[in-house]
Amino acid sequence: MPVIPALEDGEQKVFFKAGGEWCYLWTPMGFKRDRPIPVVIHHHGARGYVREEVADWLEEERKLAYLRSVMEGGGCAIAGSHACGDHWGNVDAVAANAALFEALEASPQIDTSRTGLMGGGLGGVLVWNSVLGPLAGKIRAVVVMQAVASLEAVIREGKFKAPCFKAYNLFEDMPDEEAIARIAPHDPLPRIQRLAPGTPLPRVAIYHGARDVNIPAASSAIPLAEALRKAGGNVELEVFPDVEHNVYGMGRPIEERLNAFYRSNL
């Protein structure tokens, strides 16, 4: 039995479960059932959610504007999974993300050979753990904004250490060095830094604020770009002066970049 509900021509938002987690699929106005379209899977940040008939990124106009820019640029549908909530890219979230991809792959209306990913905050960890895991070689284009790339940095910098520990079932008083060792198999940045040159990678855009003290560019965005380029990846990095942990608050400049990036790369 298909996981995704039957689709009609035109714009629609449908909710369904994949991998035990609530997911959604949003199709554009010009959608035709007999014309498979690409899809961009969005990964929410901290306190983000997908529940039955609701999702935080489908409720706020500011967030909807970004998704519309992606949809218009890529001529694509948008999908997302709750992926276990505040997951920090853990194993269960990666499995849920893979289950969403499999559901999309099983739909004759979705062309998963043209799949993009997009995420911010802790969603960035899930993006990369998916690209390095079950979605390896299946993703064309990735955008991460104000996103985490290094769990080691999260632990050492301390600001989000407690929720990160919780997501990985680590004891609150565990010494940093022990926690970093335990979390290493799930930490994207060192894994990307070890990739052999020529490893197939999606095209990537990284948008980050130079004054972001929550997720400093120096410990996530910049080393991520360097590691991807070292592996032969095609990477666009923009670190915006005077922008804090609020790339999403930039509005039109980011909308235009998302539109152009997915227009060129899906």
Image: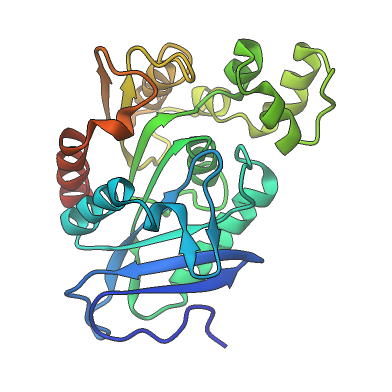
Q: State the count of labels.
A: 0
Say if 130 sits above or below 13 in the image.
Answer: above
Q: Residue 237: horizontal and vertical position, in percent? A: 27, 24
Say if 119 sits above or below 109 in the image.
Answer: above
Q: Quadrant of the N terminus?
A: bottom right
Residue at 36% across, 23% down: 225
Residue at 19% across, 62% down: 75
Q: Is residue 125 left or right of residue 116?
A: right
Quarter of the image for residue 31 reads: bottom left
User: How was the colour assigned to the protein in this rendering?
Assistant: rainbow
Q: Residue 253: horizontal and vertical position, in percent? A: 16, 33
Quarter of the image for residue 174 reads: top right
Residue 206 visible here: no
Residue at 60% across, 40% down: 89
Q: Nearer the viewer, residue 158 or 94?
A: 158
Q: Nearer the viewer, residue 140 or 29?
A: 29
Q: Nearer the viewer, residue 129 or 162?
A: 162
Residue 43 visible here: yes
Q: Is residue 70 left or right of residue 165?
A: left
Q: Residue 60: horizontal and vertical position, in percent? A: 35, 51
Residue at 40% across, 68% down: 25
Q: Residue 235: horizontal and vertical position, in percent? A: 29, 29
